[in-house]
Amino acid sequence: MRVFGLIGDKGTTVEIDEAYIGGQLRHEGSKVAKAAKTMVIGLAERDGRIHLQSVSNRRFESIKPVLDAKLADDTKEVVTDGNPTYKRLIAEQKLLQGNHGKELKEGNWTTTQTVENAFSLFKRAIVGNYHKLSPWHLDRYMREFCWRYNRRRLQSSIFDLALDSMLNRAPLPYKTLVAF
């Protein structure tokens, strides 16, 4: 039986990548602009589900808890970018690391295109649906986005799922929502 909270299984390829979200600093230089953004790690099954979560940086200590909590142990294959952190986190026989420059020259497509497309859709949702978000609520917006993305093939029953969730769960007061 597949646990819904985990990404991947024994027949699935999972792609992992990071992106920077938010931070509208302009004309300040790339280092200052990047510091104003929030780093997000994404896990995506090819033709499947996604998980997006904010992390503090690209280091081992920040990424390991996310992978431990969300990546299924029996995942067939994990494709990442060239970040060397993943060599310490993922078994060598499962890990494929891509380098976009080499891939195009050699014709070998070890790509993270699925997770990059999910980032692109989320960034577009910020402009079209959410309009503006703060770093404090970013993870909540990403969870809602992942919920909709992971149920994109259930369009005929999505209203019933949302209604059932609203009726069977306790309300979330604003005070609880913003408490840290």
Image (tube, helix red, strand yellow):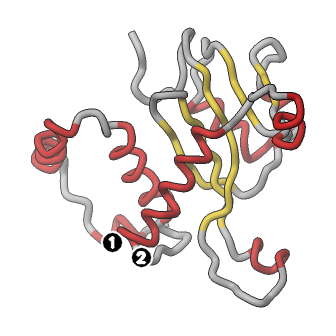
Indicate the amino acid at tag 1.
Lys
Near-viewer residue (138 or 20) = 20
Considering the numbered disc 2 on the image, is that residue within a helix, a strand or a loop?
Answer: loop
Residue 161's quadrant in the figure? top left
Near-viewer residue (110 or 90) = 110
Mark 1 sits on what residue?
Answer: 175
Residue 83's quadrant in the figure? top right
Considering the numbered disc 1 on the image, is that residue within a helix, a strand or a loop?
Answer: helix
How far from the left and from the top, in percent, is residue 11?
A: 55, 10
Residue found at x 61% / y 65%: 21
Vertical comparison of 30 with 21: above or below: below
Tell me the mark number nearer the camera, choosing from 2 and 1. 2
How far from the left and from the top, in percent, is residue 127?
A: 45, 72
The answer to whether residue 19 is left or right of residue 153 is: right
The answer to whether residue 134 is left or right of residue 115 is: left
- Quadrant of the frame with the N terminus: top left
Looking at the image, is mark 2 or mark 1 earlier in the sequence? 2
Indicate the amino acid at tag 2.
His
Mark 2 sits on what residue?
Answer: 131
Label 2 crowding class (10 Å Cα cut-off): few <14, some 14-19, many 20+? Answer: few
Label 1 crowding class (10 Å Cα cut-off): few <14, some 14-19, many 20+? Answer: few
How far from the left and from the top, in percent, is residue 177?
A: 36, 65
Residue 19's quadrant in the figure? bottom right
Checking the image for residue 117, the label placed there is none
Vertical comparison of 29 with 100: above or below: below
Residue found at x 56% / y 17%: 12
